[in-house]
Image: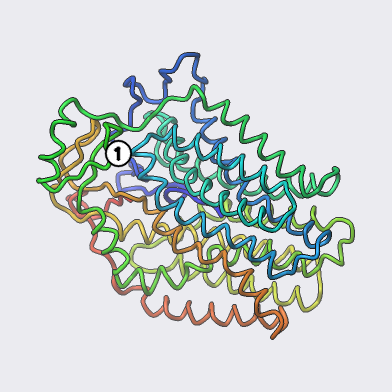
Amino acid sequence: MSTIDGPAGGDKNPGGEATSHGIDDGEFPRTRSGTAGVGNSPGAPPATPWLPAAAAVAVAAWGANQFTALATVYRARTDWSALSLAAMFSVYLVGLVPGLLVGRPAADRYGRRRVVRGALVLSAAASAVLAVPDQPAVYAARLATGFAAGLVFLAGATWLRELSGPSVPPAASARRAMYATGVGFSAGALASGVLAEWLPGPTTLPALAHALCCLLVLRATRHLAETAPGPRPEHAAGRREGARDGVRDGMPGGRGHGVPAGQGEEHRAAVRHPRFRYVVLPASPAVLGSATVAYVVLPPLVADRVPGFAPLFGGLVAALTLAMGVLAQPFAARLDDRDSARATLTAMATVIAGLLVGALAAERDSVALVVAAALVLGTGYGLTLGAGLHEVERLTRTPTGPARTTTGPNTRTGPSTTTGPSAASLYQSTTSTGFLTPLLLAGTAGHASYPVLLTGMAAVGLCCLGVTAAHSRRHLPEPDRAAHPATGRARIHP
């Protein structure tokens, strides 16, 4: 799962100016000392301060995906049922969604640095618990890992972009966050598979290795600057007045800037929008559903074809799937069309094709077809994620008109383009239902074979594609023409 705060590559306006994902053009959050990306802690900050922040995002993703290879070991060395292992995988979702929802508000209130470093401690502790091959311990570890990952995916990606500095184009900093997440997901599965395959303690050593990496990254981030905007001098005195004027302080205690009170309504309006219901939602389960079918469901079906190498094979398939997802996301940006759902339709068709290849792989017990299915499903995963983010961004931007802006040092009066939770967090919360796919398939495997179940999933996907196709050019959101009055083209600010 490549969790990014905005589509890869960013949006371009007609003049060629990249718009930011979560950071307005012309402004850049500054550190408490007033210089973007320069630390004010004792000790010298790193020459490239965004690298430790990228490492934090990557190591959180590593922890999220290390269970993929470990599940193969549990299957071979314990008497845990396939349904129990699928439930252990899916319980990660129960922690992830709250982490995604509170990650951005927490980072604004308490600071990016504090939230990310606290989440790294939690992720390390979760991996230490995961090293105990006991079912309750594994459930607890997966739950904590999900929450920690959700926090880092939002707060850490924001911190990374802000530490990149104002000289780095927003699209480039967004790509850094995307690649850090993708590398972490791939490395988690691959490293766990290698360690479980060739070193002793296959259920213990991979988890402890991740815990150690978390501690190393925690040390690397100890001198990084806090980039959350600080309050203006008049901020504390003006809180009550701001609240009466419709602006609420989202960062009590002087830990940031205020948030327009209408932002919650913006997100509720986006969820109620017909385009969200008929274009975004039908494709949402396919994002992580396609990825989890590729690297959680299919490899165990052909484990007998790779005797002695099942953990390594599972890790390789997971890394391949997620790498294809990262590579595919920029193509989703190229396919995106604000006047139709072209990108989403292409993505859904790719996922359906991958499910059919997966069904054939299960029918023929073929390792090569599992790899082929992983390639196609990974591409579908990346395309659906990128296409959905573009759609959600258009729905969550604020319409034209003057805004009551926040009271932080980097805010201004003008078109309201700021949102509370990011567009990514809203969309990722809906896509997270795909993590339930292995559990649903394991629960129904006693009533139908996997080839039949995967073909059935493809048929459901075809129905969803029909719904999206029927509304492809309908319910288009109003463009924000204030940003580019000369061209009338919308300028999108998630």
Q: Which residue is mark 1?
A: 25
Q: Quadrant of the N terminus?
A: bottom right
Assign a secondary structure to mark 1: loop
Taking 412 as reference, is 130 above or below it? below
CA neighbours of label 1 inside 10 A, class few (<14), some (14 to 19), many (20+): some
Residue at horizontal 42 percent and vertical 40 percent from the top: 158
Q: Nearer the viewer, residue 459 or 372?
A: 459
Q: Position of residue 41 (x, y in %)?
A: 44, 18
Taking 372 as reference, is 360 above or below it? below
Q: Position of residue 87 (x, y in %)?
A: 63, 65
Taking 367 as reference, is 458 above or below it? below
Q: Quadrant of residue 442?
A: bottom right
Q: Position of residue 257 (x, y in %)?
A: 25, 36
What's under tag 1, amino acid-wise? Asp
Q: Position of residue 281 (x, y in %)?
A: 42, 70
Please, which residue is most extreme toward the bottom here?
Answer: 447
Q: Nearer the viewer, residue 64 or 456?
A: 64
Residue at horizontal 77 percent and vertical 66 percent from the top: 300
Q: Nearer the viewer, residue 130 or 406?
A: 130
